Image (cartoon, grey):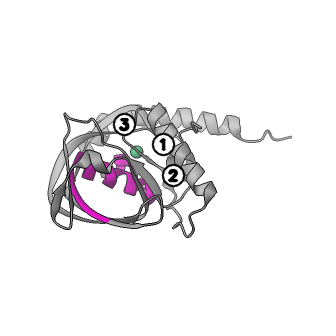
Amino acid sequence: MVLRITKYGEPVLREKGQPIEKMDESLHAFIDDMFDTMEAANGIGLAAQQVGRAMQLCIVDVSDMDDRPSRLWIDGKECDVEAFMPLVLINPTLELSGEQIPGPEGCLSFPEIYGEVSRPDKAKVKALDGYGKAIEFECSGLLSRCIQHEVDHLNGLLFIDRMDKAERERIREEISGLAEDTRLWLEHQAPKKA
Ligand code: NI
């Protein structure tokens, strides 16, 4: 089932996710819905906050992104990225290293808005997968950028927070337009006062 994607200005996007303590049927159904939602929106990553739930859970799929390559290592050995897609990351932690690399980013919670964000090239990821199994790997390139972006969501951080001043200024009007649309939408959703 495709879920509604939350937009910039909705409070849940600023909430830190709760750690997930048990995997059950309802969690699996929710993860399936997140995949349906990400695919319908043509995204490469989606965090639980983006479908309205502040949890330590995100999904990533950088398959078929040949123009923006990724690399992945397990125990120091390089592996085929496509073979590990899609990824479900539960309670993820990151250790970042390498030089800061600028690159273009978008976010499903900021429709049609893109900007350049600098992030460390490499990420060491520890998480549970969708079955509750511990996974650990290193990655770089688009996969690293995408995971860093999604894990930021899990901590209530957004890509605009990572932009430098000039980049934020460049898209300032688009961001405030979106914030205003969201404000009106939230007002409309609020129960009418008597
Ligand atoms: Ni995003």
Given residues 188 and 30, the one toward you in this image is 30
Task: Say if mark 3 contacts mark 2, CB within 8 Å.
Answer: no
Residue at x 46%, y 39% (from the top left corner): 38
Sooner in the amino-acid sequence: mark 3 or mark 2: 2
Is residue 42 in the magenta section?
no
State the mark number for residue 153. none
> Relative to 138, is 41 above or below?
above
Task: Give the magenta-colored segment's residue range.
Answer: 136-161
Q: Residue 48 carries which label?
A: 2
**Residue 158 is inside the magenta segment:** yes
Numbered disc 1: secondary structure: helix
Disc 2, SS: helix
Label pair 1/3, CB-CB below 8 angstroms: no
For residue 172, which numbered disc appears in the image? 3
Q: Please state, as top left, top right, bottom left or bottom right, where the N terminus lies in the image.
A: top right
Q: Is the magenta stretch mostly helix, strand or loop?
A: helix
Other residues around mark 3 within 10 Å, as few (<14) / some (14–19) / many (≥20)? few
The residue where tag 1 is placed is 35
x%, y% of residue 139?
22, 56
Q: How far apart are marks 1 and 3 (CA)?
A: 31 Å
Q: Helix, strand, or loop for circle 3?
A: helix
Where on the image, by quarter, is ligand 1? top left
Question: Which quarter of the figure has residue 121?
Answer: bottom left
